[in-house]
């Protein structure tokens, strides 16, 4: 978590300077992204909320994404990460939304994505989605790597005022 703080501080500074807000929907990171953003003093100025969307039940209840919304989609894809980023942004009326979905391990997910695979997306004035594959079966290391890459993506996308 301490390794994530410098990244979270950079994001916080940008969001505060721009008077912008963020909401997070994460899955395989288990709340680490939100925790890092909330660890920065003054987080209430930019962090509107978040959800750990780890199951279909959570997806339906927390993001209002039903089976019809998932037609032609599956989790752990860039398209799905973008969908949840857009939906969490919309539901919180945030400027930015971040979505993360993946397979931390120790085994591949049910769709056949390898362990160490995640897709991360940012929705807002600019949208971007990426895929990261660590090649590692270490669940905790993957959670950290996924959260770190998500924060790096936010830094890449949110302009420095």
Image: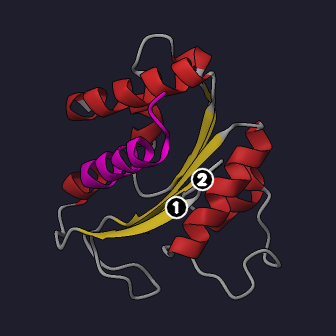
Viewer-nearest residue: 102 or 157: 157
Most extreme residue toward the right is: 68
Q: Residue at x 59, y 74 (%)?
A: 79
Q: Residue at x 49, y 65 (%)?
A: 129
Q: Is residue 117 visible?
A: no
- Dot 2: element: loop
Identify the main secondary structure in magenta: helix
**In this rendering, would 91 be left or right of 146?**
right
Tell me the number on the disc at residue 58: none
Viewer-nearest residue: 28 or 156: 156
Which residue does the numbered mark 1 point to in the structure image? 128
Picture coordinates of residue 90, whole percent (x, y): 77, 47
Picture coordinates of residue 134, whole percent (x, y): 21, 68
Tally of marks: 2
Give the quadrant of residue 33: top left
Tell me the number on the disc at residue 126: 2
Residue 34's place in the image compared with 132, above or below, is above
Q: Residue at x 18, y 73 (%)?
A: 135
45 part of magenta stretch? no
Tag 1 near tag 2, CB within 8 Å: yes
Give the quadrant of residue 51: top right
Q: Residue at x 30, y 46 (%)?
A: 148
Picture coordinates of residue 128, whole percent (x, y): 52, 61
Q: Is residue 136 visible?
A: yes
**What residue span does the magenta drawing correspond to?**
144-161
Residue 103's place in the image compared with 125, above or below, is below
Image quarter in which the N terminus is found: top left
- Dot 1: element: strand
- How far apart marks 1 and 2 lie (CA) works out to 7 Å
């Amino acid at each position: 978590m301490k390794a994530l703080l410098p990244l979270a501080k950079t994001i916080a500074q940008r969001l505060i300077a721009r008077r912008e807000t963020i909401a997070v929907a994460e899955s395989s990171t288990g709340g680490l992204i939100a925790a890092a953003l909330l660890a920065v003093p003054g987080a209430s100025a930019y962090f509107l909320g978040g959800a750990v969307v780890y199951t279909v039940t959570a997806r339906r209840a927390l993001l209002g994404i039903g089976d019809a919304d998932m037609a032609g989609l599956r989790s752990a894809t860039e398209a799905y990460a973008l969908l949840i980023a857009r939906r969490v942004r919309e539901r919180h009326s945030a400027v930015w939304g971040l979505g993360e979905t993946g397979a931390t391990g120790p085994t591949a997910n049910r769709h056949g994505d390898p362990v160490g695979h995640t897709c991360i997306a940012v929705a807002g004035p600019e949208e971007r989605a990426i895929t990261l594959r660590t090649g590692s079966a270490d669940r905790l290391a993957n959670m950290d790597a996924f959260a770190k890459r998500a924060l790096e993506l936010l830094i890449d996308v949110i302009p420095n005022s």
